């Protein structure tokens, strides 16, 4: 694990909620479209993720304008690795678990704001580098945390 990755993400999401008295559950598809980066100058290694795609279900409690929830689902991205010293370069697809929690507050009948934490666990992936200098199998455990704030538009 070479991380930490850093950067600002921007994305879109679409979902559907169902409410029964004070309990809410639903699902959501989200795409964080900007890449995250990591660079280690001492080792001349850089890594970059592609878009982070998530499919989650969520459930929680609402009291007036506030909705407190937990979520769980699947996340997918790709990771590009460039090691300029050993001349190893690879691109690997990552898929795994996402879970987290959040709070949403309705500010009008059509708008709400939210804050959310997502923990991504892509597990261990294997990447192979074969060139004149190397024949290596790399095992890399990739995890991360996303902190989101945003605005939701509701279509009732």
Image (cartoon, rainbow, N blue to C red):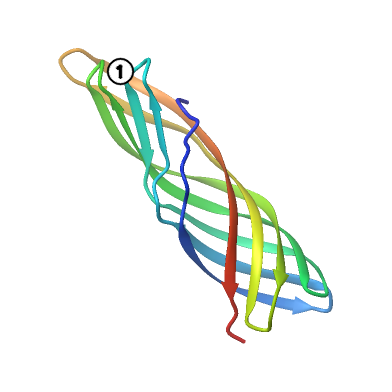
- The residue located at (37%, 47%) in the rendering is 50
- The residue located at (32%, 20%) in the rendering is 44
Q: As drawn, which residue projects farthest toward the front? A: 107
Residue 39 percent coordinates (x, y) = 38, 28
In the image, taking residue 4 as reference, residue 42 lies left or right, namely left
Residue located beneath label 1 in the image: 136
- The residue located at (58%, 68%) in the rendering is 151
Q: Residues within 10 Å of mark 1 (few under 14, many from 20)?
A: few
Residue 71 percent coordinates (x, y) = 66, 56
In the image, taking residue 65 as reference, residue 11 lies left or right, namely left
Q: As drawn, which residue projects farthest toward the top? A: 133
- The residue located at (42%, 42%) in the rendering is 36
Q: As drawn, which residue projects farthest toward the left? A: 132
Residue 25 percent coordinates (x, y) = 71, 69
In the image, taking residue 54 as reference, residue 84 lies left or right, namely left
Element marked by disc 1: strand
Question: In this picture, is 56 found above or below 81?
Answer: below
Q: How many marks?
A: 1
Residue 154 percent coordinates (x, y) = 60, 80
The quarter of the rendered structure image containing the C terminus is bottom right
């Amino acid at each position: 694990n070479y991380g930490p990755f850093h950067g600002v993400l921007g994305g879109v999401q679409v979902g559907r909620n169902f409410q029964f008295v004070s309990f809410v559950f639903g699902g959501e598809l989200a795409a964080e479209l900007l890449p995250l980066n990591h660079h280690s100058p001492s080792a001349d290694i850089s890594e970059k993720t592609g878009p982070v795609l998530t499919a989650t279900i969520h459930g929680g409690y609402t009291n007036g304008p506030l909705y407190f929830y937990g979520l769980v689902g699947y996340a997918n991205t790709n990771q590009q690795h460039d090691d300029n010293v050993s001349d190893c370069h690879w691109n690997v697809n990552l898929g795994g678990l996402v879970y987290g929690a959040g709070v949403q507050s309705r500010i009008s009948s059509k708008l709400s704001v939210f804050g959310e934490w997502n923990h991504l666990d892509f597990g261990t992936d294997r990447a192979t580098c074969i060139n004149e200098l190397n024949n290596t199998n790399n095992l890399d455990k990739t995890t991360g945390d996303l902190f989101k704030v945003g605005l939701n538009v509701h279509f009732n």
